[in-house]
Image (spheres, coloured by chain):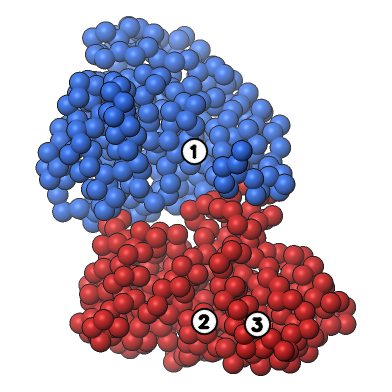
Amino acid sequence: MARMTYLQAISDALRYEMRRDPSVFILGEDIGVFGGAFKVTQGFLEEFGPERVIDTPISESGFTGAACAAATVGFRPVVEFQFIDFISCAFDQIVNYAGKCYYRWGIPMPVVFRGPCGGGVHAGPYHSQNPEAWFAHAPGLKVVLPATAKDAKGLLIAAIRDNNPVIYLENKFLYRHYREEVPEGEYVVPIGLAALRTIGQDLSIISYGATVHLCVAAARQLEREGASVEVVDLRSLVPLDKQTILDSVKKTNKVLIVHEANLTAGFGAEVAALISHEAFEYLDGPIMRVASLDVPSPFSPTLEMAMIPTVDKILEAARYLLAY
Amino acid sequence: MTTKPLIDKPRLAELNETTLLDLLYYMKLMRAVEQRIERVLYRQGKIPGAVYSARGEEAIPVGSAAHLRPDDVVVSLHRTMGMFFIRGVPLRRIIAQYMGRKGGVTDGRDGNMHMGDLAYHIIAPISHLAETVPVAAGAALAIKMRGEDRVVYCYFGDGATSTGSWHEGVNFAAVQRLPLVLICDNNQWAYSTPLEKQMAVEHIVDRAAGYGIATEIVDGNDVLAVHEATGRAVARARAGEGPTLLECKTFRMTGHAAHDDARYVPAHLFEEWRAKDPIDRYQRYLREQGLLDEEKLNAMEARIEAEIDEAIAWAERQPYPSPDELERGVYYES
């Protein structure tokens, strides 16, 4: 075990896979000489050389398409988007080329699209977004969002070894704010398994990504108030661990869903639909959601902090449900 | 507001002394404002997010914008602050914009140079570089459809020319012969990526060969050269002769943003380009022409510092936006 930040765990996974498997290579803007805008790939150029650490022009659609093609002929490319907001420039390649490739041709597409998502750092409308629902909606893509350093490592290794295109969304706030013991060397977290962050009887809070930590903080506070709260970290949206969700709901009978992406048509709606269909008789209250408001991410801190989920907003919804 | 509009002059020969001194004033104002933002306000924690500056690139927005008529349209970039001054956007609103306060150009919804205001015919950029080029072409299309003689400026950097959107926008403007002036601030670095990793041709204008438009390579550190070349491009656009690509060669004398120390840039390049500083060069020229002396220079610098002090004081008096406003204006209402 080694103590790592969330960011170091991502680097560790990438480095481990690149050392283990010569078919893995990385490409993106400023990832080589500069080591990446957030320094995830610092030192990679020196270790792996320019053939496997490719600095690209500002051409997201171009290098994404190139990675997709390389994936069909035996490589396992990992594409970095400098900020995940820029993935929209490559939307067509991902949704229409990568996502449909295996279904149409039977040709596997082992490619990872990774980059920093999320707000809370006052980066404005184009450096703060959470686009997971765009991709969860497109068949053929897997979507994972690690909340911890261990999962950041284990899920990235799993994503690289997966024979499908995987959208791997890392939270930029967690990069240097979250640190824990992470297994060294081989460590795989299978894609499609949720994790329980707290165990409880009275309320299930279902979340993923950075807001998992807010939910755990809220659960600790509610414990002090006498409630027993279970926090489910989905870790993977596609495929979705329906069993863990339903097991938790059938035990607690009350559900709060939390994500940082904005509310309307967010992934929480899919989880709510699943629960209402599969566990309707077990519910003792409405399925509630806490998410960002339906506005573009504003720059000014007063606006941004009012927009995104906070521990207080989660507590308010949780207390309402617990009293229901 | 203390900045004053420049007189639109199509040719350098017609520039009068006031205009020549205005070019210096706007370049110096831009540099002083950006220095204050980057080295004082940002470090004091008064500016959230990221700060981008255009140290060494001031001649490009200033020399080009001096040709704009009030009804011309500009699509801005994060390194074009001088253009905002020339258009008449009050400095205090720009400072408040950086601070994320009310009274800023976007009232805190967006930050730094991410701003536009159609009252000044300025269209805001987005972070996805060159997405503005098709937008600028569309603004020019509207002008052409109405039979007006207005022009559109579109500013972008060298890196933006690698995107598909840039090529789609330029091609559309070329096919439609739109009144568009494409102004490339070629500062040779896109974040850490140098030109040779951005493209396999030597000049940005080489890319235009595929589109059949007029091009010109300009010394981007010579404000008069930028002014002259832009004048020719504007004349072509107003005459219905279609778009022109101006490649203004310069050098980014900073990191990509305030958080980037630019260690990846070879130090000798900074040395070489410091000697070509557009403000120093132009000051020397004006002195040689007998248009500038120590007294005038001191007065100009004192005026600039006073204007900045006043703008910061005003901005700091503005409140931060209230969370009550957060959900307003996502959709057009009433």
Between the residue at mark 2 and the residue at mark 1, the CA separation in whole angstroms equals 37 Å
* Chain B, hue in figure: blue
Going by the image, does A223 lie left or right of A114?
right
Label 1 crowd (10 A; few <14 / some 14-19 / many >=20): many
Q: Amino acid at mark 1?
A: Met
- Name the residue carrying label 2: A236
Subunit of label 1 = B
Residue B73 versus residue B329 in the image, above or below: above
Tell me the colour chain A is drawn in. red
Q: In the image, residue A215 lies at what x, y percent?
A: 70, 75
Q: Which one is nearer the viewer's eye here, B329 or B78? A: B329
Query: Which quadrant is home to the C terminus of chain B?
Result: top right
Element type at marker 1?
Answer: loop
* Rendering coords of residue B134 (x, y %): 31, 43
Q: Which residue is mark 1?
A: B115
Q: Quadrant of residue B135?
A: top left
Q: Residue at x 66, y 27 (%)?
A: B314
Q: Chain of mark 2?
A: A
Q: Circle 3 sits on which residue?
A: A276
